[in-house]
Amino acid sequence: MKATQTNPNNASGPQPKHVTLGRIGLYVFLAVSAAFFLLPLFVMIVTSLKTMPEIRQGELFALPASLNFDAWVRAWSTACTGLDCNGVSVGFLNSVKIALPSVVLSISVAAWTGYALCFWRAKGSEIIFAILLVGAFIPFQVFIYPLVRIFSSLGLFGTLPGIITVHVVFGLPVLTLLFRNFFVGLPYDLFKAARIDGANLYQIFRHIMLPMATPIIIVAVILQVTGIWNDFLFGVVFAGRQNLPMTVQLNNIVNSTQGVKEYNVNMAATIITAIVPLLVYFFSGRWFVRGIAAGAVKG
Amino acid sequence: MATVSVRNISVAFGGTKVIQNLSLDVQEGEFIVLLGPSGCGKSTLLNSVAGLQEIAEGQIWIGGRNVTWEEPKDRGIGMVFQSYALYPRMTVEQNLNFGLRMAKVNRDEIQKRVSKAAQILQIQPLLKRRPGELSGGQRQRVAIGRALVRDVGVFLFDEPLSNLDAKLRTELRVEIKKLHQALGSTMIYVTHDQIEALTLADRIAVMHQGVIQQLAPPKEIYRRPLNRFVAGFVGSPSMNFLSGKLEGSNGTAAFRLSEGKLLSLAGYPFKGPFAQGQPAVLGLRPEQILLRDKPAGATTLPIQFVVDEPMGADTLIWGNVGQEMVSSRVAPDQSFSPGDSLEASFVANQSSIFDGVNGDRL
């Protein structure tokens, strides 16, 4: 059934009540809360647009005298991260190189695994599922040292494939759970009908189940993009000098102990780094809530 | 068109055997209905024939071929599910031709078969729509169409009408019967609805606890149920049961009601001799208890009137025989008042007599 569009000209139901004191209180509270959470962002943006002499005057909330994007340009292309002075642009590229394959790989593998766990009742699939559950709840810091040893003996340590592997492996338990829970909610008759139609396990996945999984794929993409983009620990440990992601380079800029602290450059670099997950949330928040709900209905 | 032969199969879920040593032979072009309460194993039997359920023992033959170990697609069957099981992200046309695309049938042939099926089921205007935009009846037509394009000899229906409202159900029931007449295919149809079973089937297999209780044409099932389960399950309102004892001998047999009254069973075709005083149950369909005209040779059965239920075409009269409540179906113009003593009667050779212990027909 299609939902009928609400037309403001013939809306039904009781007339909205006039503004009450409670309503005013509610809106005041919401406005204050919003301001409270927006204030740091405001300070960051304002500071990034000021010159250093302006910042030294100490008026944190004052608007900049003139719009000055020098700090942004420097943060992007010439700020020093340790010995190199190429700004966060290098890190941005590295982060893209890490995140893109990690997201695609982890979601592809997890979708297939979740599907197989749900529809292919192989012997031992219950045990694999239990292991995955455990994997999803063990803190990943525990694995770092053993992984370093394994990766260095395989020659993966400090390489791009190495860091991508780490992200895929650590993404799998939660993503598989997500996909399995989604597929469990689909009617089993669909699978039976497709088998009668002569589709094999892969064809059923490709032609029938995957097209139905769009909402949950979007959730997975959001989870993975933001998670991998914001990752610091794996990046600093596994990526290697050439592939340090943006978060690590940002840290090197902001926490450098040498020279004068350039607050405007630091602020600009931080905003640039955070822009990708912010945009992802901004444009897909609605899908995110919907998908999580869809995945959580049946377990 | 093909025969289906189920030979001594057993099916187990975990440790419990759902079906044990079951055999069933379906003739070419026959319409078989598997009828039984939920959990009786009828859907499991159908899934086994389809190849969707692994069987522990036994064999399944379709069209003279042993298909016990073959994939569902290679068995020459088409199946229709209760939940329709249409692929939601495909159009009706894509739903219909999905199996053919998987089998890499050439385009012209696909086009030909899809348009033929669409024409038979009158769903041509729906071909470009998605399942979500169809009504329940239309969806079930598409689901039947999906089985139709496969050009197979055997159709399997798993409670196909249970999700539809009463009016549509009647409509589609007739369509399925018409389809069977037109195609002449072998059909196996699972339902718990006795009306569907009685109206559609060439033969009904009544199932209970994984065992086929009786396999016979609908009239036979209705008139001469082989045991108390079949007698009670088929028919609405269900058959009246009066408990008592058998007396006399073959030919002059009589039935002693537990309240003491003796009813003559002269003319009842007993299968064999019975013991004096053997516990038994007398089964009478509501329309077999006659209230107005007493045919020659009929046995009298006194009933205390309790209530009546006018149902339009006929009226149900509820009354007591001793402690036991019985119903009688009569013409709608008859009326009584509470407490009336009614002189009812029944014809012995139309009634059913069951063993009081194991419930088998005597």
Image (cartoon, helix red, strand yellow):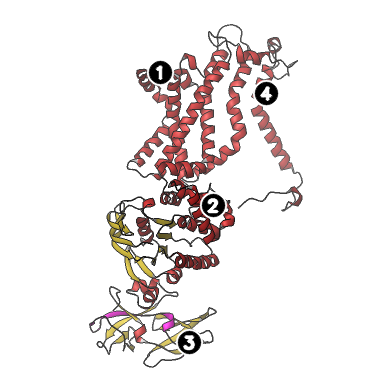
Q: Mark 4 points at which residue?
A: A42
In this rendered view, identify the residue nearer to me: A241 or B184: B184
Q: Can residue B132 be seen in this view?
A: yes
Image quadrant where one finds the C terminus of chain A: top left
Q: Give the range drawn in magenta.
A: B267-293
- Please state which amino acid type lies under the numbered disc 1: Phe
Mark positioned earlier in the residue sequence (2 or 3)? 2
In this rendered view, identify the residue nearer to me: B93 or A10: B93
Q: Which chain is indicated by disc 2?
A: B
Q: Is residue B326 visible?
A: no
Q: Which residue lies furthest to the front in this view?
A: B108
Give left or right: position of B358 versus B318: left
Q: Quick one: label 4, few (<14), some, or many (20+) residues within 10 Å?
A: some
Mark positioned earlier in the residue sequence (4 or 1)? 4
Q: Which of pointers 1 and 3 indicates the residue nearer the eye?
A: 1
- Please state which amino acid type lies under the numbered disc 4: Phe
For the point 35% across and 56% down, the residue is: B48
Q: Which chain is indicated by disc 3?
A: B
Q: Mark 1 points at which residue?
A: A157
Q: Quick one: label 2, few (<14), some, or many (20+) residues within 10 Å?
A: many
Q: Main secondary structure of the magenta part?
A: loop
- Please state which amino acid type lies under the numbered disc 3: Gly
Cα gap from disc 2 to disc 4, whole angstroms: 53 Å
Q: Residue furthest top?
A: A259
Q: Mark 3 points at which residue?
A: B339
Q: Is residue B7 shown above or below B326? A: above
Q: Do the dots labelled 1 and 3 sit on one chain?
A: no
* Mark sitting on residue B92: 2
